[in-house]
Amino acid sequence: MDFFLLLPECALAAMILMFFAATLAKPRQAVLEGWASAGALCVFAAAWWTYGRSGLFFHDVYEVDTFSQTFKLILSLGLILILWMGAGLRGITRHLRPEYYLFLSLSCFGLFVMTSAVEL
């Protein structure tokens, strides 16, 4: 088994943990936007780097193949676009901004897992 194939999920999990910590620390908006953009670009780079490889994990219920990797690239591109288009966040109060990024990355992680799930 090549656990290198799980790099996009691991990068997104690191991004989730970073935003969870940000909910406790409450950093400035510019810092949050920078972290979000850098994290989303790292997730896209990880998905691009593992593209074209395949493998089965967790007793063959999690399959990484070209199909799932294609959707992970599309989802990570969508995450980047949402983060860049939502810069500024005028409609969200200041103390809820870290949670916005946390829930956005959590939902992307759920979509990543669903694209590779063999059995729902």
Image (spheres, grey):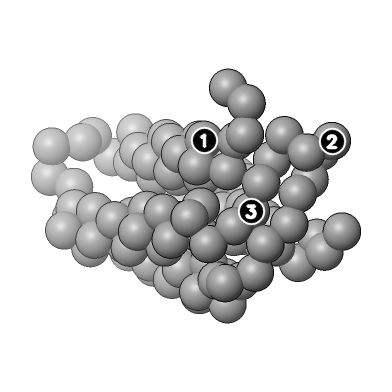
The residue closer to the viewer here, 99 or 75, is 75
Left or right position of 5 against 24: right
**Identity of the amino acid at label 1?**
Met
Residue position for label 1: 114
Label 3 to label 1: alpha-carbon separation? 11 Å
The residue closer to the viewer here, 34 or 103, is 103
- Hey, which quadrant is residue 92 in on the image? top left
Q: Position of residue 43 (x, y in %)?
A: 51, 64
Compared to residue 47, the image places residue 98 above or below, namely: above
**Identity of the amino acid at label 3?**
Val
Quadrant in the picture for the C terminus: top right
**Identity of the amino acid at label 2?**
His
Label 2 to label 1: alpha-carbon separation? 16 Å
Residue position for label 2: 59
Would residue 22 be visible to someone looking at this image? no
Which disc, if any, is residue 64? 3
Would residue 45 be visible to someone looking at this image? yes
Q: How crowded is mark 3: few (under 14 residues within 10 Å), some or many (20 or more)?
A: many
Q: Where is residue 96 in the image (x, y as percent from the top left)?
A: 34, 33
Q: Residue at x 84, y 35 (%)?
A: 59
Q: Foreground mark, 2 or 1?
A: 2
Quadrant in the picture for the N terminus: bottom right
